[in-house]
Each structure stands twice: as structure tokens, then as C-alpha cells.
Image (cartoon, rainbow, N blue to C red):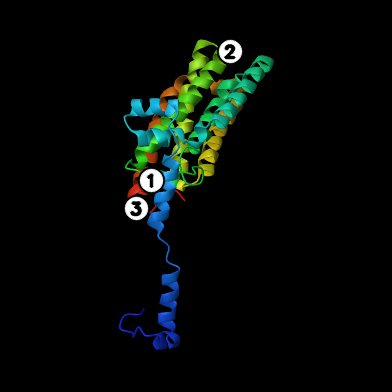
Amino acid sequence: MTLGHPTDATHLAQCGDCQARATLGALDIDLDRIWSGVAAEVWATPAGRFERGAAALLGSPGLARALVTTPSLVLAWVLATAAVFAVGVVATYTSDTPWVALVAPVLAGAGIAYAYGPGADPAFELGRSMAISDRTVLLTRAVAVFGVNALLGVAASLVASEAGALTWGWLAPMAAVSALALAGSTISGSANVGVGTALGAWAIVVLGSAVETRDLASAANPGALAPAYLVVAVLAGAVALWASERSGYGTPLWR
């Protein structure tokens, strides 16, 4: 009822304000109770062997659950990434172009862009309700996704028998492109923007190198540009951390 208005049925039948308040009261939903039910259902899922190991390593069951629910670490995504690397191995054999090193930065960037955020993570809102900062979840997932992609890339490079310096050289541009994707997706609140940032940045590097040297493979070996790639990775990573801090204490950047 409206403050100061009578509460009898006659007044309610004649007062539009009181009728509106009564209707809203009837539609009132206990969001706390519903949210508790959703959280209980999610946490009721028994922890698997990998999650128990992650919990022991990280010292936090909540962080381990956030890690195993990373969209770009689900089995289907990892298998798809491995399949792309396998195609890169075949293309390397048939064309003598180091396609594994050329596709690795983009694959890692896409995986990291989709590692965190409401547009990609079904458990994003639930994760934000845990006693774990957004920054911690973001860093844990980013490191895990990068590590998985790096291991797959190194394995593919070894199978493709690429030379030692070339086998490891692409890790520097991979780190830079991944950090740019993370920064782009965190600032914009869109995983697709992060993927676009990774694709655009790496395309500029590859095409620019190809135009200058007439050799597409030269982009895969950073050479003297390795320090520049690492600087870009550090700066972009710092921007992503700054954006994740803002999203935790102010207007959400992830939409």
C-alpha cells in the first residue's frame, strides 16, 4: 500500500497507486532464494580428477571450479585447436611454409578472448558471486589457455620438424597476440572484439613481413623483434588487468 493511504478494500478499489503497489507486491520474486538454488545446482556437480588436482595446486576449490569451466578449455575446443594444428603440420609438409608457427598466435588469441566474460562463459555471473576476484579468475584462465595452446603448438612444431629457433621463436608473437586479444576483449566486454584484435594485429604483422621480404615464413621467426613482442605482451597484459579491476569495482566492462 502507498504510505499514508488507508488499507481498507474500498480505498484499494478506488486508488490506482495502491493497486499498482499491490500488483508489484504480488509479482515480487525472491531472487536470493532462486540464486541460491542455481548456485547449489552448479556446486552439486561432483569434482572430477582434474578439478581435484587443480584445487590442490591452486589451494582454492572455487578457483579450480572457475578454471575447469573455462569455455576455451572444454574438450571440444581443445580437440578443435589440436585439429587446426594438425592441418598446419600437413600444410607445412606440403608447402615448406611454417603454418604451425603462423596459426599458433591466432589460435591462442582466440582461446584467451573466449576464456572469460558473460558473452562466452555461461557461469560468468555465478563466478562473480564467489569470494575470488575477477582478476584472479582472468589470470588463471589466461595462463591455462596459453599453456595448453603453447604445448599443442610445440608438439605440432616438433612433428613438423621445424628448426630449433623457429620452433620456439613463435612463442614471443604468440604471447603478444594473446595479450592483445585479452586486452581487447576485457576493455570492450566482447570476446568477438578480442578475436578481431588478435586476427587484425597478426594479419598486419604477417602481411607486412611478406610485403617486405617476399617470404610469408619470415613472420614466424621474430628475430630482432622478439623484445618488441614481449614489451607489447607486458603492456597489453597490464591494460587487461587494469580493465578487469575496473569491471570489479565500477561499471561492468563485460556485457
Task: Mark 1 vs mark 3: give the one in front.
Answer: 1
The percent coordinates of residue 36 (x first, y second) are: 39, 50
Residue type, mark 1 in image: Arg
Q: Position of residue 194 (x, y in %)?
A: 50, 40
The amino acid pointed to by label 3 is Gly
Question: How far across and down, in percent of the image, does residue 169 sit?
Answer: 48, 18
Pick whichever, 57 or 24, lies toward us.
Answer: 24
Residue bearing mark 1: 128
- C-beta proximity under 8 Å, tags 2 and 1: no
Residue 14 is left or right of residue 220, and the answer is: left
Q: Secondary structure at mark 2?
A: helix
Q: State the residue at coordinates (50%, 31%).
A: 73
Query: Residue at position x 49%, y 42% from top?
Result: 121
Where disc 3 sits, the SS reads: loop
What is the C-alpha distance between the residues marked 1 and 3? 14 Å
Residue 159: which disc? 2
Q: Tell me the tag on residue 240.
A: none
Element marked by disc 1: helix
Q: Residues within 10 Å of mark 3 (few under 14, many from 20)?
A: few
Q: CA distance from mark 2 to mark 1?
A: 41 Å
Compare marks 2 and 1 and give the one earlier in the sequence. Answer: 1
The residue at which mark 3 appears reads as 250
